[in-house]
Amino acid sequence: MTRVIRKFLALPWAERWLLMQAMAALPLVTLTLMTVGPRRCYQDLARLTPIAPGGALTVTNADHRASRTAWLVRIASLHGLAKGSCLAQSLTVWFLLRRQGIPASLRIGVRLQHGRLEAHAWTEHRNRVLDDDADIGRRFSAFGGVGGVLEHRGAELP
């Protein structure tokens, strides 16, 4: 336990704060997905974090912060109250990035594996995968625009 605390204290203050936000947001997103479904969860998170065009961050800073945010959500899923599904984790990354003024895209893809239809979610920033392997888009066929999928009725996912 002291090793975990030492690692936490070694993080820059801003990342400690972001990790605490991730540890709070991930269980809430997970619970919201279970109670109101993906469409409503996505809409509510989007409404809470309207993103303004042309933020104050440089591209390099935004790329770095996007990568670190995804990493911190992963840490929150490993050591926090809720592991969360890939959808919960990706929505949490997407939400936290929007809170920082960093545009991101939520992707949901499907594939047929051994006769079973599988679905997976991940987050991208400037067409770069943040919270999964870089080739995830080749392994899963992503929907054109997740926003459109989750904003319309009949798009409830398990």
Image: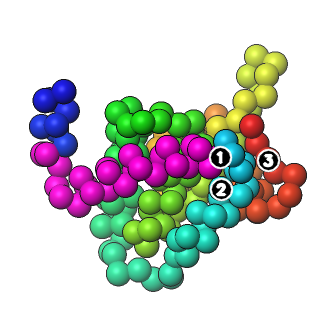
The three-letter code of the residue at mark 2 reads Cys
In contact (CB < 8 Å): disc 2 and disc 1: yes
Question: Residue 56 falls in which quadrant of the image?
Answer: bottom left
Q: 52 above or below 145?
A: below
Instruction: Name the front one of labels 3 and 1.
Output: 1
The residue range painted magenta reads 9-33
Circle 3 residues within 10 Å: few <14, some 14–19, many ≥20: some
From the image, tell me which residue sits under label 2: 41
Residue 113 in the image: state x and y as whole percent.
74, 22
Q: Amino acid at mark 1?
A: Leu
User: Between disc 3 and disc 1, whose residue precedes?
Assistant: 1
Image quadrant holding the C terminus, namely: top right
Question: Which residue position holds label 1?
Answer: 33
Q: Is residue 123 left or right of residue 19?
A: right
* Visible residue check, residue 122: no
At mark 1, the secondary structure is helix
Disc 3: which residue: 156
Q: Earlier in the sequence, mark 3 or mark 2?
A: 2
Q: Whole-Å distance between the Cαs marked 2 and 1?
A: 6 Å
Helix, strand or loop at mark 2: helix
Q: Residue at x 79, y 22 (%)?
A: 116
- Position of the N terminus, as image quadrant, is top left
